[in-house]
Amino acid sequence: MTGTALRIQLFLISYSPLALIFAIRAIPPGNDEQLRSWFVPVGFAVLGGLGLALAIRLLRGGRRVSPVELRVAGIQDEGAQAAGYLATYLFPFIVFGEASWRVWVAYCVYFLVLALVTMRSNLILVNPTLYLLRRRVVRIDFDTRRGTGTTDRQSAILICRQLPRVGDTVSVVRLADGYLERSP
């Protein structure tokens, strides 16, 4: 899986609760039985379910790969960015109303911009779905040996159960440009 593919997966995973919120908000009022009025809520529910399934697949997939050991040289918990990130969750409560095609096109443009900004920034590290699945997404620094003793400092995404400390050794499997902590 490429780094871009992992970031797309993390984006879909992180916004699956928002898709479920949209699904609930899009349920037609009253007992509207027209099939087309259920297309949007069902579509959002499928998107939310896809995100949850990707999260479970991502976490379980790490059990089938041989782990490597990394010694943590630095760590950045991106949890402080959660407030800014969760502001995007207010979107359906502020502007959800009219259901014309122009509104849906505007939503699509908004989510395209949101996806690009999220995947190209550290906001991808703030992931409420993984938090719900008792994981954290952090950035760690670690040293790698090159040749006969020179070391290079590298930084990568780490999906873990508990926040490691500097000096800890973590057992991980590679995920594109990041790592998944190997569960015992």
Image (cartoon, rainbow, N blue to C red):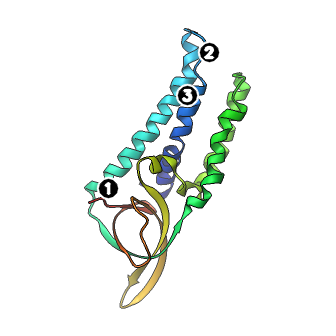
Q: Residue 62 carries which label?
A: 1
Where in the figure is residue 23, as x and y percent of width and height? 55, 28
For the residues marked 3 and 1, what is the alpha-carbon distance in whole angstroms? Answer: 31 Å
Q: Nearer the viewer, mark 3 or mark 1?
A: 3
**Mark 1 neighbour density, 10 Å: few (under 14) some (14–19) many (20 or more):** some
Q: In this view, does 156 lie above or below 58?
A: below
Residue 177: give x, y in percent of width and height: 46, 63
At 70% from the left and 23% from the top, the residue drawn is 101
Circle 1: residue type: Gly
Q: Which residue is drawn at 53% across and 48% down?
A: 11
How far from the left and from the top, in percent, is residue 46?
Answer: 47, 30
Crowd tier of the residue under label 2, counting other residues whose Cα lies within 10 Å: few below 14, some 14–19, many 20 or above: few
For the residues labelled 3 and 2, the Cα–Cα distance comes to 13 Å
Q: Which amino acid does label 2 sit on?
A: Pro
- Secondary structure under badge 3? helix
Look at the numbered discs 3 and 1 and tell me whether their residues touch, using CB distance below 8 Å.
no
Q: Is residue 36 above or below residue 74?
A: above
Three-letter code, disc 3: Ala
Disc 2 target residue: 29
* Residue highlighted by disc 3: 23
Residue mark closest to the camera, 1 vs 2: 2
* Crowd tier of the residue under label 3, counting other residues whose Cα lies within 10 Å: few below 14, some 14–19, many 20 or above: many
State the image quarter where residue 150 is shown.
bottom left
Residue depicted at x 57% and y 20%: 27
Looking at the picture, how far across and down is residue 86, in whole percent? 62, 47
Q: Is residue 4 visible?
A: yes
Quarter of the C terminus within the rendering: bottom left
Total labels: the figure holds 3
Asked if marks 1 and 2 touch (Cβ < 8 Å), the reply is: no
